[in-house]
């Protein structure tokens, strides 16, 4: 369903918020009238990691450092109506001042940033991936955020394949499995590896798995506790040490540009000091902190098996998913030079994640896919050259 069909939802939410703001202003004392309340929306429950570990303490710091000139009103779980894919429009139209959203939920809206989700592109880990995502957003992907003030951008730490009955140790085990997919890019990856992708939000995963509609899910470790994914799956397959993760979900904290411009100078400086790369890494660290205990718990649970891909399985999956990257680079949608975006991103990964082992794997765009028959694109992905020595099965 398109945004225009749901315009009434956005208008109703805007009306409610404006009415509340007017009533509050009418009752405020002169000293209180200088307070700016930032309305923040997101798609997860209030108890989720994003709000408890990042947004809540971040808002507390904003209020303290601004001498109470900035306050936050957080609306979790899409309380203002609509669906998660509409959050960028809610920010752009001023329904809310800020939204935390997964860019991939709004397919095609942030085309340059899709490069971050390409198969086996980023390192596993929230901080490692978030550092690269922020750098990429400030350079090659900057135009994706022309309609917003970007406060932070993060990686979810990388995809893990959680399955109910089938242990995925190599690509052959993927054949025919129906796996939940969080994004369009993840769907393409799952299909390329021989599985069948099924798109659905996190809240539906456990119930759908329990009913046998799907065989497993592609989801980060951090998603396991709030969705109770561990209650309906037994096997958990991740990339090994020094291997790029199969794909990531990229999340961003977007702010309405007019809301940012309206802030008093002092408040704007406080917001700036608590945003950007530091806030991106703060999100990433919160994800890493959440990943460690859940992974350790399941690795030590006899009812669960944590599997790290060995080098051969990793290479076969990378090779099988190469077509996803090639097709993405060959597309000239919106006139983007996607091959140049990939080259820029790979250079950043090489520089910022040197622990990843490197094996060159050229991308060739077929002449039939090129705008010019003479155009040939070549770029390098990273793959392990050495032997994986950590995070083996059952580790």
Image (cartoon, rainbow, N blue to C red):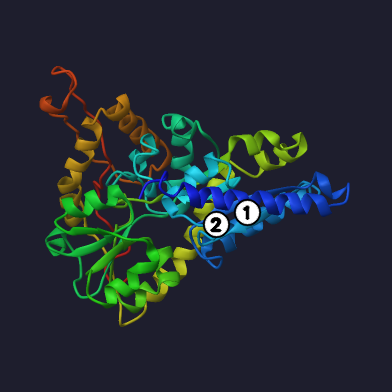
The one of 323 and 68 positioned closer to us in this rendering: 68
The one of 172 and 79 positioned closer to us in this rendering: 79
**Residue of label 2:** 80
Where residue 304 appears, as percent x and y from the top left, is 30, 77
Q: Which mark is residue 16?
A: 1
Circle 1 or circle 2, nearest the eye: 1
| Location of residue 156 by image quarter | bottom left
**Which SS class for mark 1?**
helix
- Determine whether, in the image, residue 101 is placed left or right of residue 333: right
| Location of residue 111 by image quarter | top left
Where residue 380 appears, as percent x and y from the top left, is 25, 34
**Which SS class for mark 2?**
loop
The image shows residue 142, relative to residue 181, as above or below, that is above
The one of 121 and 76 positioned closer to us in this rendering: 76
Q: What is the residue that sits farthest to the bottom in this orientation?
A: 302
Mark 2 neighbour density, 10 Å: few (under 14) some (14–19) many (20 or more):
many
- Determine whether, in the image, residue 40 is placed left or right of residue 218: right
- From the image, which quarter does the C terminus lie in? bottom left
Residue 336 in sight in this render: no
Which mark is first along the chain, 2 or 1? 1
The image shows residue 302, relative to residue 99, as above or below, that is below
Where residue 161 appears, as percent x and y from the top left, is 28, 63
Name the residue rendered at 43%, 39% in the picture.
Answer: 352
Name the residue rendered at 84%, 52% in the picture.
Answer: 28
Disc 1/disc 2 C-alpha distance (Å):
9 Å
Where residue 7 appears, as percent x and y from the top left, is 47, 46
| Location of residue 117 by image quarter | top left
Residue 229 in sight in this render: yes
Q: Which mark is residue 325?
A: none
The image shows residue 151, relative to residue 231, as above or below, that is above
Callouts 1 and 2 close, C-beta under 8 Å: yes
Name the residue rendered at 41%, 50% in the picture.
Answer: 85
């Amino acid at each position: 369903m398109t945004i225009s069909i749901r315009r009434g939802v956005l208008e109703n939410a805007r009306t409610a918020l404006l009415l509340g703001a007017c009533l509050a202003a009418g009752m405020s004392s002169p000293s209180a009238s200088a307070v700016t309340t930032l309305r923040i929306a997101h798609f997860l429950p209030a108890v989720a990691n994003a709000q408890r570990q990042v947004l809540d303490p971040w808002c507390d710091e904003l209020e303290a450092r601004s001498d109470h000139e900035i306050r936050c009103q957080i609306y979790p779980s899409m309380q203002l109506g609509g669906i998660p894919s509409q959050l960028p429009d809610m920010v752009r139209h001023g329904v809310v001042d800020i939204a935390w959203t997964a860019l991939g939920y709004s397919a095609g809206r942030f085309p340059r940033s899709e490069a971050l989700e390409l198969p086996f592109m980023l390192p596993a880990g929230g901080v490692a991936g978030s550092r690269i995502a922020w750098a990429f957003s400030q350079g090659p992907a900057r135009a994706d955020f022309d309609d917003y003030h970007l406060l932070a951008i993060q990686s979810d730490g990388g995809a893990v394949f959680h399955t109910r009955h089938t242990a995925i140790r190599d690509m052959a085990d993927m054949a025919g499995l129906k796996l939940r997919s969080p994004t369009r890019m993840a769907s393409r990856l799952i299909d390329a590896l021989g599985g069948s992708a099924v798109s659905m939000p996190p809240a539906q995963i456990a119930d759908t798995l329990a009913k046998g509609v799907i065989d497993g899910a592609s989801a980060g470790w951090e998603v396991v506790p709030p969705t109770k994914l561990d209650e309906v799956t037994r096997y958990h397959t991740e990339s090994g040490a020094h291997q790029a993760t199969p794909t990531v979900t990229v999340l961003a904290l977007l702010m309405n540009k007019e809301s940012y411009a309206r802030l008093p100078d002092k408040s704007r400086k406080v917001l700036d000091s608590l945003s950007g790369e530091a806030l991106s890494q703060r999100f990433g660290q919160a994800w890493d902190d959440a990943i460690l205990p859940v992974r350790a718990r399941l690795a030590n649970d006899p009812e669960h098996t944590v599997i790290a891909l060995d080098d051969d399985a990793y290479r076969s999956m990378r090779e099988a998913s190469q077509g996803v990257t090639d097709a993405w680079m060959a597309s000239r949608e919106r006139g983007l030079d996607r091959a140049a975006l990939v080259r820029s991103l790979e250079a950043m990964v090489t520089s910022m994640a040197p622990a990843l082992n490197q094996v060159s794997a050229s991308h060739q765009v077929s002449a039939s896919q090129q705008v010019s028959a003479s155009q040939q694109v070549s770029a390098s992905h990273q793959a392990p050259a050495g032997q994986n020595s950590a995070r083996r099965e059952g580790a």
